[in-house]
């Protein structure tokens, strides 16, 4: 199986490359390196003892992308390439719609030209907005409150329309909850370019002394300890979810456009996360509780039943393991790649 991974040098992409290589797939990465580092792929090759076919390019260049897909006889695509900062999307929405939505349209055109019609899309639980009930199933209503989430939801709608118009398309739409952790080797992990947007790398950098303290946005939510509750999924479990989705697309069971939640089904509060990280690292994590952040919800966690049953996939690693692996990565890579 020849698999193209757009954005494959990034955090989740690199871990997915590794899992695919370990299963003897032929992996090709197309990435413009705007928010990633090609060194991740060098380390992936070291871990897998296998090679990645890498091309530095932008998926918005449909001609170059078509040529790459055709020349490498790609069978299916895993689409990670996209910008992901909620804050930046609020300040520069055009950048997000151009990259995330226009980029996906360019990819679909290239795949159409090359008659490649199997796609796994990297979506997000952000598309659920403020949940009406917990846990969140795929049948929950969708709504978004920022351009990043809106770009994901727009792409989902485009993909659903593409599959409806042409029955040859098979599309698995994966809505992840909160990816965290790192590969247990400590060689690859989450490497934010600037101040982290996600809580786990932020906590890690506080623990290693790179950042002074953590700000917890809101301590008065209707949750067991007042802090926000999220569903943290180990990045290795998440990567394996993409393999399960590819296997599904290659089965007779797959048809059209299908959405799947990838999460543990368990909520962890910010204070519980801090406690688990302090245990894993042996470090004290100083924090302040500050005002709630606009757009945040009190609690958000998945109902992963559909992925369990249809994809045969289940998250195996808990918050303690997530913290242990995130800390190992941070210690080994105090300044990132």
Image (cartoon, rainbow, N blue to C red):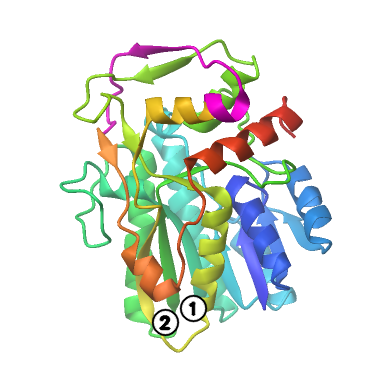
Q: How dense is the environment of label 2, judged by Cα within 10 Å: few (below 14), some, or many (20 and up)? A: some
Specify the farthest residue to the left: 132
Depth check: 321 or 182 in front?
321
Residue appearing at x 49%, y 12% in the figure: 286
Residue appearing at x 69%, y 59% in the figure: 18
Residue 333 can be seen in this image: no
Quadrant of image for the C terminus:
top right
Quadrant in the rendering for residue 76 = bottom right
* Residue identifier under label 1: 249
Q: What stretch is highlighted in magenta?
A: 278-297
In the image, residue 289 lies in the stretch drawn in magenta: yes
Ranked by sequence position, the earlier of labels 1 and 2 is 1
Most frequent secondary structure within the magenta stretch: loop
Residue 99, horizontal then vertical, whole percent: 50, 47
* Residue identifier under label 2: 254
Residue 179 can be seen in this image: yes
Residue 178, horizontal then vertical, whole percent: 43, 43
Residue appearing at x 38%, y 48% in the figure: 151
Instruction: Confirm or deny contact between disc 1 and disc 2 (CB under 8 A).
Output: yes
């Amino acid at each position: 199986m020849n698999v193209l991974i757009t954005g494959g040098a990034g955090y989740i992409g690199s871990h997915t490359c590794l899992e695919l290589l370990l299963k003897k797939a032929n992996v090709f990465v197309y990435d413009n390196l705007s928010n990633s580092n090609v060194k991740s792929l060098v380390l992936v090759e070291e871990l897998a003892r296998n090679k990645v076919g890498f091309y530095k390019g932008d998926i918005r260049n449909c001609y170059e992308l078509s040529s790459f897909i055709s020349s490498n006889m790609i069978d299916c695509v895993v689409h990670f390439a996209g910008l992901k900062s909620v804050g930046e999307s609020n300040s520069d929405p055009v950048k997000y719609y151009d990259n995330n939505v226009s980029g996906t349209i360019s990819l679909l055109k290239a795949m159409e030209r090359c008659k490649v019609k199997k796609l796994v899309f990297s979506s997000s639980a952000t598309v659920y907005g403020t949940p009406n009930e917990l846990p969140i199933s795929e049948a929950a209503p969708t709504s978004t409150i920022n351009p990043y989430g809106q770009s994901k939801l727009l792409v989902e709608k485009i993909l659903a329309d593409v599959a409806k118009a042409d029955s040859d398309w098979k599309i698995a739409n994966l809505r992840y909850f909160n990816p965290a952790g790192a590969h247990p080797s400590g060689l690859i992990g989450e490497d934010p370019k600037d101040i982290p947007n996600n809580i786990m790398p932020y906590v890690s950098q506080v623990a290693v002394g790179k950042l002074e303290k953590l700000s917890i946005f809101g301590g008065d939510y209707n949750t067991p300890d007042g802090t926000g509750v999220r569903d943290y999924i180990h990045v290795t479990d998440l990567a394996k979810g993409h393999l399960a989705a590819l296997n599904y697309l290659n089965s007779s069971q797959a048809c059209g456009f299908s959405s799947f939640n990838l999460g543990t089904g368990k909520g962890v509060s910010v204070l519980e996360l801090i406690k688990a990280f302090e245990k894993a690292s042996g470090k004290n994590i100083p924090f302040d509780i500050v005002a709630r952040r606009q757009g945040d919800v009190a609690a958000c966690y998945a109902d992963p039943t559909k992925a369990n049953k249809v994809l045969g996939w289940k998250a195996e690693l808990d918050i303690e393991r997530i913290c242990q692996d995130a800390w190992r990565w941070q210690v080994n890579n105090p300044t990132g790649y």
